[in-house]
Amino acid sequence: MVRAAIGLGSNLGDRPRHIGDAVAALAEAGSLVRVSSLYQTAPMGGPKQGTYLNAVVVIDTDLSAQQLLERCLEVEQDQGRERRERWGPRTLDLDVLLYGDETINDVELSVPHPRMTERRFVLEPLLEVWPDAVLPDGTPLAGFSAGVAGQKVRKLEAVVPDRRTSLALMLLVVAGALAIWWIGDWLL
Ligand code: A4P
Ligand code: MG
């Protein structure tokens, strides 16, 4: 088993769905360790394009790094990814950020992802779920955070109703049920 981190990005179409479906698919490529929050991030590089949603998933997997990349490319295809230009808008982009402590420099695969330390949209979700992540030479990734602090990234909080909202919703449901019962009783 190897622990791997995968970066997810989407700025076209139903962005939360593309990310959610990708997380579900990646969960089947191994065992899911952590999933970060969603982050709304300003596009870096490429043409003028819409805001991204980014996230990071950590999995333990028996797939080789190449197999994991192939699986990522398949999942991108499943989410309607079209490659028109480098750094152009995309329904889904999956990047293998880290694969254990391996350094890979193949034509098809570079790990660690060559630009990960320059990007807040990668570092922030990664460090949320894997605070002590390191590069293969042992350098802590947390050390790169200060250098990217100027980039625009906003963490989106999970939409979980707080206790007061839950209570209000419960009372509404009870009141609705009582009203239906009372009207039914009155009509008969
Ligand atoms: N490839 C090599 N190494 C990897 C790796 N570690 N993980 C090869 C994934 N793929 C890797 O990728 C082209 C080829 O890279 C793949 O076929 C694979 O063999 P691509 O996804 O078609 O091209 P791309 O994504 O346009 O280019 P690139 O250089 O991978 O771009 P990045 O670095 O992924 O950046 N701004 C915000 N806010 N959020 C984003 O998510 N993403 C990008 C893309 C630019 N700006 C962004 C974001
Ligand atoms: Mg990419």
Image: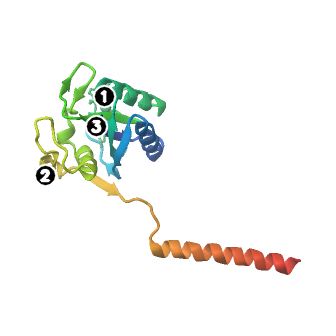
Quarter holding the N terminus? top left
Give the camera-side residue of 81 and 24: 24
Rendered residue at 17%/48% (across/down): 148
Instruction: For the residues labelled 1 and 2, say whether their Cβ atoms are less than 8 Å apart.
Output: no
Q: Nearer the viewer, mark 1 or mark 2?
A: 2
Report which quarter residue 15 is drawn in.
top left
Report which quarter residue 111 is drawn in.
top left
Whole-percent x and y of residue 87? Answer: 30, 32
Q: CA distance from mark 1 to mark 2?
A: 27 Å
Label 1 CB-ligand 1 distance < 8 A: yes
Relative side of 65 to 24, left or right: left
Disc 2 target residue: 146
Q: Nearer the viewer, mark 2 or mark 3?
A: 3
Whole-percent x and y of residue 146? Answer: 13, 52
Q: Residues within 10 Å of mark 1 (few under 14, many from 20)?
A: few
Whole-percent x and y of residue 90? Answer: 39, 35
Secondary element type, mark 2: helix
Whole-percent x and y of residue 19? Answer: 42, 43
Disc 3 target residue: 4
Residue 141 shows in the view = yes
